[in-house]
Amino acid sequence: MTEKIQIESKNQEELEKIGIKEIIKEKYHAAMDRYKVQFILMFVIFIIILIIVILTLVPPFNDPDKVYWVSGERDNFRDPTSKHPLGTDQHGRDYLTRLLHAIKNSLLFGFITGGICIGIAVFVGIIGPFKGGKVDGTASFITNIALIFPQIPFILLMSAILQIREWWVTMLVIALFTWPWAARSIRSQVLTLKERNYIKVARMSGLKDTKIAFGEVLPNVLPYVFLAFIIFLGNAIITEAAIAMIGLGQQNWLTLGLLLNHAVEWGFIYPRRLYAMWLTPGICLILIYLSFFIMHSSLSRTFEQRKV
């Protein structure tokens, strides 16, 4: 009898192993089918960003301020050639080199600003509902005021008033006035999640509200947090470019907006008509924002399928 029981248990274990393997295989194929487009898109964007970063670290692209000399004289405002595919600017600097550095810096600016925005939104949107009372009331009041506040005019006003024209000032000004809508959306999701049974069980087990908020609730809103971060990233890059282009942004950190500002100030558009020097930064801004928009749209559809 014992031998039969052992044989049956072994057979059952083998069947369970086969079943687990099949389940894992099915889950893997289902995930690949669902995320195939998103994976390809994110991979392409990652490769493009990696190429830009690598090019800005190796000669001759590692020095955006390098001046190229031709016959002992500065080769200023040169049309595109094989040596300078996008020509040279007012100081004889290779424009392609400066464009690559501008793309890298704009992306870095967007990532940092987006991180600050989403950090504020997550903190305000999660802590308020769990603490309740005066904390939730104060957080909701601040969020409502920030929501109806004219953000873009105030950002332009602060940029014009502040005498310090540094990249971190522009970053903070943008970050402090673009987070409210995400905080409001996160708050509404947290209010729904806090009524779930597993949250009630966690409360009964004696866990603190902050630990429940960031340990139990936050993982469930991470998909939305990631989508909001993508929006913040694209908006930060576009906003910085707009402020820099009209001359109210920082002037020390080479970005796509600063290149557009130089194109206006030095007459690249008119009368010199150096199209490569003002069209390329604008096209890069459009492509960057469009890529993040497509990523957001595809990922949002994926997360909606997961909820169904």
Image: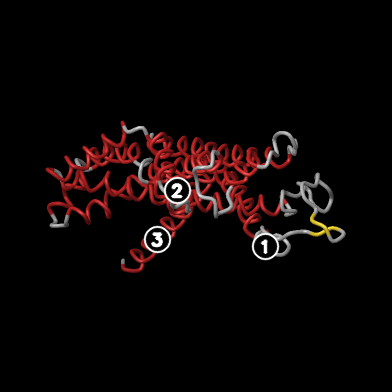
Picture residue at 41% right of the left edge, 34% below the top: 153
Of badges 3 and 1, nearer the viewer stands 1
Picture residue at 65% right of the left edge, 41% below the top: 263
Image quadrant in which you'd find residue 15: bottom left
- Residue 92, percent from left and from top: 75, 53
- Residue 297, percent from left and from top: 50, 35
- Residue 79, percent from left and from top: 81, 44
Residue picked out by circle 1: 62
Drawn side of residue 193 relative to residue 88, left or right:
left
Residue at mark 1 to residue at mark 2: CA–CA distance: 25 Å
Picture residue at 26% right of the left edge, 35% below the top: 145
User: Looking at the image, which is closer to me, 158 or 59?
Assistant: 158
Q: Earlier in the sequence, mark 1 or mark 2?
A: 1
Q: Are marks 2 and 3 in contact (CB under 8 Å)?
A: no
- Whether 223 is drawn above or below 19: the answer is above
Residue picked out by circle 3: 13
- Residue 219, percent from left and from top: 33, 50
What's the residue type where badge 3 is placed?
Glu
Residue picked out by circle 2: 170
The number of callouts visible is: 3
Picture residue at 27% right of the left edge, 53% below the top: 214
Q: Earlier in the sequence, mark 2 or mark 3?
A: 3
> Which image quarter is the C terminus in?
top left
Drawn side of residue 15 relative to residue 92, left or right:
left
